[in-house]
Amino acid sequence: SDLGGLTTGQVIGFSLSDISILTTSQLSGFTAAQFAAFTTTQLNGFPATILADLSAGQAAAITSSQLGGVTTTVLNAISTTNFAALSNGQLSGLTPTELGGLSTTNFGVLSSSQLGSLTTTQVLGLGSANLSGLTTSQFSGFSTTQLSSLTTTQIGALTVTIVADLTA
């Protein structure tokens, strides 16, 4: 598509109605730099089916501040491959509410390193469904400080295997 020739200034000028009608093939025409220029409002306007088809370069270009302003619908539309590849820096932008709203599918692909990079405030946002699905490998990424911040409800959501690791 010819969209790759647009300047970032032109991309920022896209209206929500422009964004809402983009096709997958048109999305593939955007460069990583153009994708990084989209506002959170614009990202929230992308159809979920389009976001699932982001290239690795486009997903890597999303900034932490962009991620911190999108809806959980947008976050959960990102493919598991791209979600797993998000950097710790990108994840630092997620709010506790966003983390709590992650699908078990996308939360399940986060590595121990990614989970270990979360702040205690972010950890407090983790929901029971996601905590109950943690693997021992993922759980090993949490620091003592992060674990100390868990609420009793969150601790109650942990599996027996994980709790056994806590007491070992």
Image: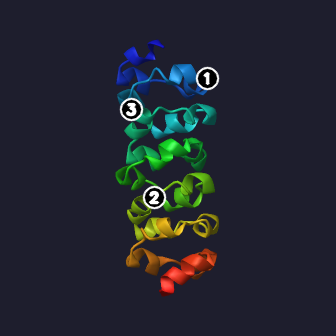
Asked if marks 2 and 1 touch (Cβ < 8 Å), the reply is no
Kindly report the distance in space between the C-alpha atoms of the residues bearing marks 2 and 1.
Answer: 34 Å
Q: How was the colour assigned to the protein in this rendering? A: rainbow
Which type of secondary structure does the marked residue at label 2 adopt? loop
- Name above or below for residue 71 compared with residue 2: below
Which amino acid lies under the numbered mark 2 shown in the image of this protein? Answer: Ser
In the rendered image, residue 8, in percent from the top left (x then y), is placed at 36, 24
- Name above or below for residue 26 compared with residue 129: above
Which amino acid lies under the numbered mark 1 shown in the image of this protein? Answer: Ile
Residue visible at 45% across and 50% down?
68
Pointer 2: what residue?
111
Kindly report the distance in space between the C-alpha atoms of the residues bearing marks 3 and 2.
Answer: 27 Å
Crowding around mark 1 (Cα neighbors within 10 Å: few <14, some 14 to 19, many 20+) is: few
Pointer 3: what residue?
37
In the rendered image, residue 48, in percent from the top left (x then y), is placed at 62, 36
Indicate the quadrant where residue 127 lies. bottom right
Residue visible at 55% across and 41% down?
79
Crowding around mark 3 (Cα neighbors within 10 Å: few <14, some 14 to 19, many 20+) is: some
Side of 138 where 37 appears, left or right: left
Which type of secondary structure does the marked residue at label 3 adopt? helix
Pointer 1: what residue?
21
